[in-house]
Image (cartoon, grey):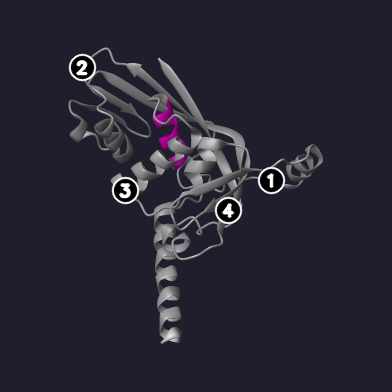
Amino acid sequence: MILSRSPLRVSFLGGGSDLPEYYLNANNAATLSTSIDKYMYIALNKASKDHYKIVYDNIEIKNSVEEIEHSRIRNIFKKYNVPLGYEISSFCEFPTKGTGLGSSSSYTVAVLNALKVGKTKYELAQEAYHIERDLCGESLGKQDQFAASFGGFNFIQYHSDETVEVTSLSVSADTLDTLDNNFMMFYTGINRTANDIFLVRQTLLLVMKRKKRYKAT
């Protein structure tokens, strides 16, 4: 059995600038975030039968990769030719669905890590983004994949050539204590999908671009 985990994250500023609709046309795209001590766990194991078993909110037992309903697992297993006879389960220490802690990308990073994809944290994060954005067709940015892959307190910059620069911040113990003593997190039970929020942001960014072009003419 292979066990893998990746952290959830809290973002302080810059959300939305990690969207390609923004950073491809800007020179100041960046986010500030920190991972927290709550994790997404993945267990990958040989199954007792010749099928795929995927355990998350649902339980899927499928006889071919094309039948898998979980889009990220389907695309990952398909790309990396994971054969029949494997089961994969996910667990988290915190409510994850629509809570805004980057859990979906933590899931992708942990799955890829279990499959030993990527020689570096950077490659792991970029591949997670590729799976989610290009193969699954989700409207999202790059912040969560890099936060989950690198961990820690990071200033992350997104460049128009599609490269990402991660600067690990050396935060003093006193500053961390201040943050720890002045931040509280509550689960409200209110969920929303990141995809819906990013679609709104994408629309707003397109409107802003058109306004700039109109003024320029």
The amino acid beneath tag 1 is Met
Q: Which residue is mark 2?
A: 50
140 or 62, which lies in front? 140
How crowded is the residue under tag 2: few (<14 C-alpha within 10 Å), some, or many (20+)? some
Direction right: furthest residue: 174
Which residues make up the magenta segment?
Answer: 105-113
**33 falls in the magenta region:** no
Question: What SS does tag 1 mark?
Answer: loop
Q: Which residue is mark 1?
A: 184
How crowded is the residue under tag 3: few (<14 C-alpha within 10 Å), some, or many (20+)? few
Q: Which residue is mark 4?
A: 31
Question: What SS does tag 2 mark?
Answer: loop
Mark 3 against mark 1, which lies toward the viewer? 3
Mark 4 against mark 2, which lies toward the viewer? 4
The amino acid beneath tag 2 is Asp
Image mark for residue 134: 3
Taking the spot 52% from the left edge, 38% from the top edge, the residue there is 148
State which quarter of the image contains the N terminus.
Answer: top left
Direction top: furthest residue: 48
Q: CA distance from mark 2 to mark 3?
A: 29 Å
Q: Earlier in the sequence, mark 4 or mark 1?
A: 4
Q: Position of residue 99 (x, y in %)?
A: 51, 47
- Tell me whether circle 4 and circle 3 mark residues in contact (CB < 8 Å): no
Q: CA distance from mark 3 to mark 1?
A: 35 Å
How crowded is the residue under tag 4: few (<14 C-alpha within 10 Å), some, or many (20+)? many
Q: CA distance from mark 4 to mark 3?
A: 22 Å
Taking the spot 33% from the left edge, 38% from the top edge, the residue there is 72
Query: Would you identify the image quadrant in which residue 151 lies?
Result: top right
197 shown above or below 52: below
Q: CA distance from mark 4 to mark 2?
A: 44 Å
